[in-house]
Image (cartoon, helix red, strand yellow):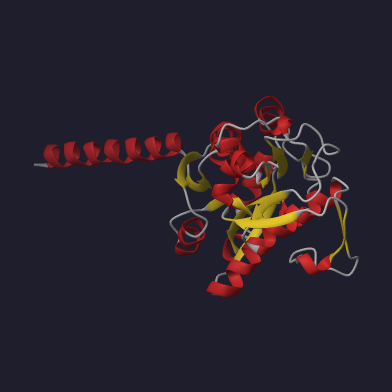
Amino acid sequence: MRGIFTFLGSTLAVIILTSVLLYEGEGEVITIGASSGPYSDMVNFALKPALEEQGYTVEIVEYTDYIQPNNALHNGDLGANLYQNVSFMKDFNEENGTDLINLIQVPTAPMGLYSSQFDSLEGIANGSEVALPLDPVNSSRGFQTLEDAALIEIAEDANMLAIEEGDIIQNNKNLEFVYQDSGQLPRSVDQIGLSLVPGNYALASGMDLADALQLEQMNENFRNQIVINEKDADTQMADDLIEAVESDHFKQTIDEQFQGFDKPEGF
């Protein structure tokens, strides 16, 4: 009988030891949500390998909308997400009672002014229509990109996160503004002839950032962030995510595979 108990005890010890070794071999699991396209690619090719070097097992969940990634993060289904700027995050917190925080900025595909009719900014015809994103934050980015191109001038006292047509004090080409859902804007390059397309939608549609007549000079409020729950701010996971973004592998991958992305200062 004693031999049986000894055998069972030894077997149980082996099972426990094996489980521990398997767990240690797998590493802590971190689930990261990202929008389909360049940012899920960024997580997969730039962020995931850097986290794996730290011993993590990384799971990636792709989303096609801008609401579910934050809901999933708030509910604990994700450890972090990558798809939004700090302005969008703050609005989401205010509207939904969530406590999300931005952890670190990442290189971001800039909005661009694209055209199927004009080869240069100087060649844009007087009175041309230009399509802009429908939502206030991204339409503000569009207006600022037009100002960067010297096509319009915006009043100094305008709210840069909520620019309206009334804030335009000079419209050098008498442009007419058409507002559309961001997903429609790549098609508007041909349909309207002049369109301000957010970088992620441009890339997802097979467009080349280098083809833009003008690329956005990005305000840090519009640069995408890795976002986590506030309760995780002081965790090892948060520190490791920052370290991964600052790693040589992450930076090298950005330089090689994400050319044209606007980089945070000091990146």
Farthest residue toward the front? Answer: 126
Residue 146: where, in percent of width, then height? 80, 50
- The answer to which of 73 and 142 lies nearer the viewer is 142
Horizontal relation, residue 151 to residue 84: left or right: right
Horizontal relation, residue 179 to residue 147: left or right: left
Determine the residue positioned at 51% across, 39% down.
56
Q: How many marks?
A: 0
Farthest residue toward the left? Answer: 1
Horizontal relation, residue 226 to residue 262: left or right: left
Residue 38's image quarter? top right
Residue 51 in view: no
Query: Quarter holding the C terminus?
Result: top right
Residue 16: where, in percent of width, then height? 31, 41
- The answer to which of 211 and 13 lies nearer the viewer is 211
Residue 49 in view: yes
Q: Is 87 rendered above or below residue 183?
A: below
Query: Quarter holding the N terminus?
Result: top left
Determine the residue positioned at 53% across, 46% down.
34
